[in-house]
Amino acid sequence: MTLQSDTVAKLDPEILSLNSVSLWQITWHRLFRRRSAVVGLCILGILVFIALTAQWLAPYDPTRSMLDVDPPQKIKARSAPCIHLLGCPEDQPQHLMGTDGNLRDQFSRLLYGSRLSLMVGFSTVTFAIIIGTVLGAIAGYFGGWWDNAIMRIMDVLLAFPSLLLAIAIVTVLGPGLINALLAIGIVSIPAYARVMRASVLSVREMDYVSATRALGGNNLQILFNRILPNALTPLIVQGTLGIASAILDAAALSFIGLGAQPPTPEWGSMLGAERNQVFTAPHLVFYPGLMIMLTVLCFNLIGDGLRDALDPRLAQLS
């Protein structure tokens, strides 16, 4: 065993039980040893399953009123859940979570809402990470006026509360889901740019980077082939936690009418549409709020687990 392997094994004895010492195998091994991360992955797996099978699980069209499905049926507005197994009359249509103010099946809308929320989280964070990584890498590697110009712009964006800045951007661009996604992505860029810049500043001083530079490697080759692959670890953790924040921001924008527009099934807009019925029909706001809470919780648990798994010092203490 080489000196480097001996050093790694002393820092983390669990590596000795692995056939390979690749970073991702070690990370997954550590991640699945943390119960909170496993719980988060289980919740995420259920949400992904619901999102992929919503069209088969949902009993009704989420955007269609029950009056259009079967007009002769007498359905009360904002009706309580009707479950036949729990005593609801067989002659009434079954609605596991009731119907909303527009007589749309709440359960179907909740299932389809999982697609939109996951899409919002992953798409906005992907957009923000790509832009933030490029800007942070350029600022950290080249320094000088590149660093000053890019980071001062990031500081200006960080000076505004993220949600208020997103509201301002959507107000200028116009309400809608696409504009909301763009706004959330823009306000998330500074966090990833700062994380990447700090990581690049530490990695660019490593010996292998100096060796590549001495062998005649150009700046782009050094940056993208040597520095970036070794500077992505903190960005992965930040991105996982950022998905939860993006879902919350999207729900907030939809809640005030700037995000997804009716009749699109989105948890935030479902809360906003029925917020005045919190005492007369609490189930209409309870279930969407519960889904938002579970989704945010699962990504926070996964992010915390990844942070511990990717940090050898925290893994040694656990």
Image (cartoon, grey):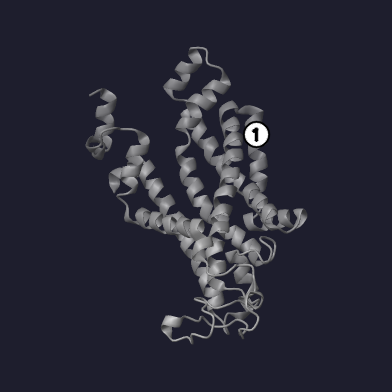
Q: Look at the numbered disc 1 and give the secondary structure of its residue.
A: helix
Toward the top, the furthest residue is 215
The residue sitting at 46% across, 41% down in the picture is 234
Is residue 158 visible in this depiction of the protein? no
Q: Is residue 300 left or right of residue 63?
A: left
The residue sitting at 48% across, 36% down in the picture is 232
The kind of residue on which mark 1 rests is Asn
Residue behind mark 1 = 148
The residue sitting at 66% across, 75% down in the picture is 68
Q: Is residue 174 above or below residue 230?
A: below
Q: Is residue 259 above or below residue 318?
A: below
The residue sitting at 67% across, 49% down in the picture is 182
Is residue 122 visible in this depiction of the protein? yes
Q: Are there few (<14), some (14-19), or many (20+) residues within 10 Å of tag 1? A: few
* Residue 38, image quadrant: bottom left
Residue placed most toward the observer, 174 or 149? 174
Q: Is residue 208 above or below residue 80?
A: above
* Residue 15, image quadrant: top left
Residue placed most toward the observer, 71 or 239? 71
Residue placed most toward the observer, 84 or 134? 84
Q: Position of residue 196 (x, y in %)?
A: 53, 37
Q: Position of residue 87 (x, y in %)?
A: 44, 86
Q: Position of residue 300 (x, y in %)?
A: 45, 55
Q: Quadrant of the N terminus?
A: top left
Q: Position of residue 21 (x, y in %)?
A: 30, 32
Residue placed most toward the observer, 59 or 246? 59
